[in-house]
Image: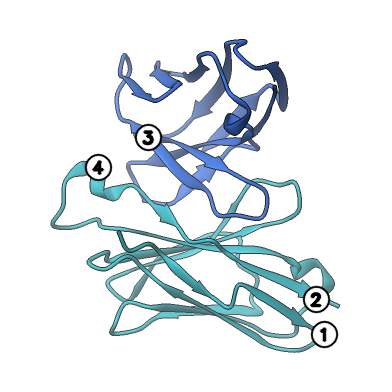
Chain colours: A cyan, B blue
């Protein structure tokens, strides 16, 4: 079965540079979530989109922005990168409308490991 | 704000030694409680969701039981391949984001 696809898998950037992370949700899924997971920490919610509109916002820095496109893929843009931005960034997707209750379960991608040097 | 607390932080088991993990939560209206398994450097892998107190779900050697304030994940006769971090997350009625606990890292020795 198709899963959530994230690219790139690994990314190394220097401080103050910009990074763009991409997420391709499971086909039919209408909701995308972004999470940041630091070393040894639990995933922290950043932002989510439902039907291409921002639906919820968590602890996302102002330096970060995200959007969901017409094909439902999403991109997380990160500017003025700092050393503390080094983390695993996960995207998850789910189907909120038109499916069963179980379809609201969120399935995660393999993540993008961002290293800022 | 939704809060999820998992205990213990780490659990070292001998192969075949059954044990339980705990997830305590406070949420303003629970839509669902999720269990994920995460291997180092990989994305959380969905295990199951529980929706109401009294519900139980099983998957292979794992069994989850939900109460109004806690969820227990019991591992029966674990094998080394069960070694992973087990994450508990809650989803509130008012929104769909998942709030995660810090996880329990389970290590099963052969």
Report which residue position mark 3 lands on: B48
Question: Pointers 2 and 1 in contact (CB under 8 A)?
Answer: yes
Picture residue at 66% right of the left edge, 55% below the top: B41
State the CA–CA distance, disc 4 to disc 2: 37 Å
Report which residue position mark 1 lands on: A14
Foreground: B108 or A49? B108
Report which residue position mark 2 lands on: A116
State the CA–CA distance, disc 4 to disc 1: 41 Å
Question: Pointers 4 and 2 in contact (CB under 8 A)?
Answer: no
Chain bearing mark 1: A
Relative horizontal placement of residue B52, taking residue B70 as reference (left or right): left
Report which residue position mark 4 lands on: A102
Q: Is residue A10 above or below residue B93?
A: below
Label 2 Cα crowd, 10 Å radius (few <14 / some 14-19 / many 20+)? some
Same chain for the residues under marks 2 and 3 in the image: no
State the CA–CA distance, disc 3 to disc 1: 39 Å
Chain bearing mark 3: B
């Amino acid at each position: 079965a198709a899963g959530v696809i994230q690219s790139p898998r690994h990314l190394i950037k220097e401080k103050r540079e910009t990074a763009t992370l991409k997420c391709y949700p499971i086909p039919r899924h209408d909701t995308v979530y972004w999470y940041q997971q630091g070393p040894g920490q639990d995933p922290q919610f950043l932002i989510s989109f439902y039907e291409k509109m921002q639906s919820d916002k968590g602890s996302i820095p102002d330096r970060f922005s995200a959007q969901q496109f017409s094909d439902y893929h999403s991109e997380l843009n990160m500017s003025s990168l700092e050393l503390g931005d080094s983390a695993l960034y996960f995207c998850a997707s789910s189907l909120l409308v038109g499916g069963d209750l179980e379809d609201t379960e969120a399935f995660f991608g393999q993540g993008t490991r961002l290293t800022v040097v | 704000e939704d809060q999820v607390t998992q205990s213990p932080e780490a659990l070292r088991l001998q192969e075949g030694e059954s044990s339980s993990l705990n997830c305590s939560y406070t949420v303003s209206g629970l839509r669902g409680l999720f269990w994920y398994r995460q291997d180092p450097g990989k994305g959380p892998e969905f295990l199951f969701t529980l929706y109401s107190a009294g519900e139980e779900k099983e998957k292979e050697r794992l069994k989850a039981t939900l109460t109004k304030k806690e969820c227990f994940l019991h591992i029966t006769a674990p094998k080394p391949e069960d070694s992973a971090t087990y994450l508990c997350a809650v989803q509130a009625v008012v929104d769909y984001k998942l709030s995660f606990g810090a996880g329990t890292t389970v290590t099963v020795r052969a």
